Image: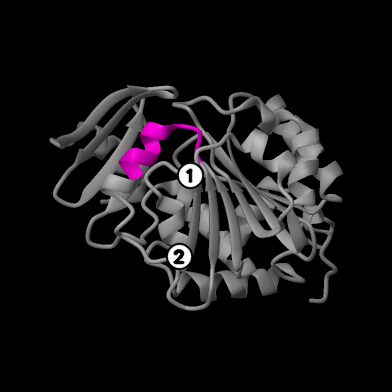
């Protein structure tokens, strides 16, 4: 099944209904085909798990978020649980990773624990029924990676439009920490305002990657150093990462340069990378 049409094929598939109930974030539906188990909220796809390869990134936005593995995080804070797609992607038998996950909906937590959580291994998981907008301002810990993948159907919380919230995220990152945000773009002006806010908070160290086949943009904001010191080094690291993934990150240097500000020499200005080529 090609990633470009996985959403359409799953929606039209003859799938068995495993779970269906109203919740505080919308109508939850869990279905399963011979190969996939998938969770929808109000008809919007939230999670897809390949039953034969549970750690595989199935959805296009999840493939792009895998880019954050270049940061080699040991402690991760995630907002938005769904079916645990990102937990499975970032869980690894190598090294110690500590996960804290905030999920506001108790029914999603129930579905995850019943239908998804036996499909990966992680050393430590703290699963909280809590709003990330309440958790972050009170948090006294720091994380190597914060992932904000928060949707209720097609809607996102207002905190993702507030610069003060991203300031709190910055405080909760370790010195070389990375913030990753999945944004569904309704208008270009909305994306521009988000980019300006993150550039101010993260001293312009921001990388924006549009997701193929949908209206999402994945934003990477670096508290410390970026992934690489040059575009060529980044391309090399991305190639090495993709060689280890079941679903490679669908990204080329040309696509990056087409959607981010560049210097005259071709380096990505938003990264503030010194050109050593």
Residue at disc 1, secondary structure: loop
Mark 1 lies on residue? 212
In the displayed structure image, the side of residue 76 where residue 26 appears, left or right: left
Give the magenta range: 103-112
In the depicted structure, whether residue 235 falls above or below residue 103 = below
**Which tag is nearer the camera, tag 1 or tag 2?**
2
| Circle 1 Cα neighbour tier, 10 Å, few/some/many (<14 / 14–19 / ≥20) | some
In the depicted structure, whether residue 97 falls above or below residue 259 = below
Viewer-nearest residue: 233 or 153: 153
Quarter holding the C terminus is: bottom right
x%, y% of residue 18? 18, 36
Quote the CA–CA distance across marks 1 and 2. Answer: 25 Å
The answer to whether any part of residue 11 appears in the image is yes
The answer to which quarter of the image holds residue 263 is bottom right
In the displayed structure image, the side of residue 129 where residue 131 appears, left or right: right
x%, y% of residue 179? 68, 51
Q: Residue at x 59, y 24 (%)?
A: 186
Name the mark on residue 138: none
Q: Residue at x 67, y 46 (%)?
A: 259
Mark 2 lies on residue? 91
Q: How is the image coloured?
A: one colour
| Circle 2 Cα neighbour tier, 10 Å, few/some/many (<14 / 14–19 / ≥20) | many
Residue at disc 2, secondary structure: loop
Q: Residue at x 30, y 59 (%)?
A: 119
């Amino acid at each position: 099944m090609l990633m470009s049409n996985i959403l359409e094929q799953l929606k039209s598939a003859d799938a068995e209904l495993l779970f269906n109930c109203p919740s505080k974030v919308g109508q939850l539906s869990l279905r399963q085909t011979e190969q996939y188990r998938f969770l929808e909220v109000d008809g919007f796809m939230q999670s897809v798990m390949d039953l034969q390869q549970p750690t595989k990134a199935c959805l296009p936005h999840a493939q792009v978020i895998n880019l954050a593995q270049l940061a080699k995080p040991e402690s991760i804070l995630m907002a938005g649980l769904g079916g645990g797609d990102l937990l499975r992607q970032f869980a690894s038998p190598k090294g110690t990773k500590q996960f804290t996950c905030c999920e506001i909906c108790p029914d999603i937590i129930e579905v995850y624990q019943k239908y998804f959580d036996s499909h990966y291994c992680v050393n430590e998981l703290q699963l909280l029924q809590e709003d990330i907008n309440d958790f972050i301002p009170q948090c006294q810990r720091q994380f190597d990676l914060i992932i904000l993948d928060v949707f209720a159907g097609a809607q996102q919380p207002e905190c993702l439009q507030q610069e003060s919230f991203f300031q709190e995220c910055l405080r909760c990152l370790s010195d070389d920490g990375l913030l990753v945000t999945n944004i569904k773009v309704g208008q270009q002006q909305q994306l521009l305002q988000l980019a300006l806010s993150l550039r101010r908070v993260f001293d312009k160290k921001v990388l924006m990657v549009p997701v193929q086949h949908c209206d999402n943009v994945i934003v990477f904001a670096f508290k410390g150093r970026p992934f690489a010191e040059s575009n060529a080094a980044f391309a090399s690291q991305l190639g090495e990462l993709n060689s280890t993934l079941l679903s490679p990150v669908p990204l080329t240097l040309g696509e990056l340069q087409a959607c981010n500000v560049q210097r005259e020499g071709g380096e990505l200005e938003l990264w503030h990378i010194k050109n050593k080529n």
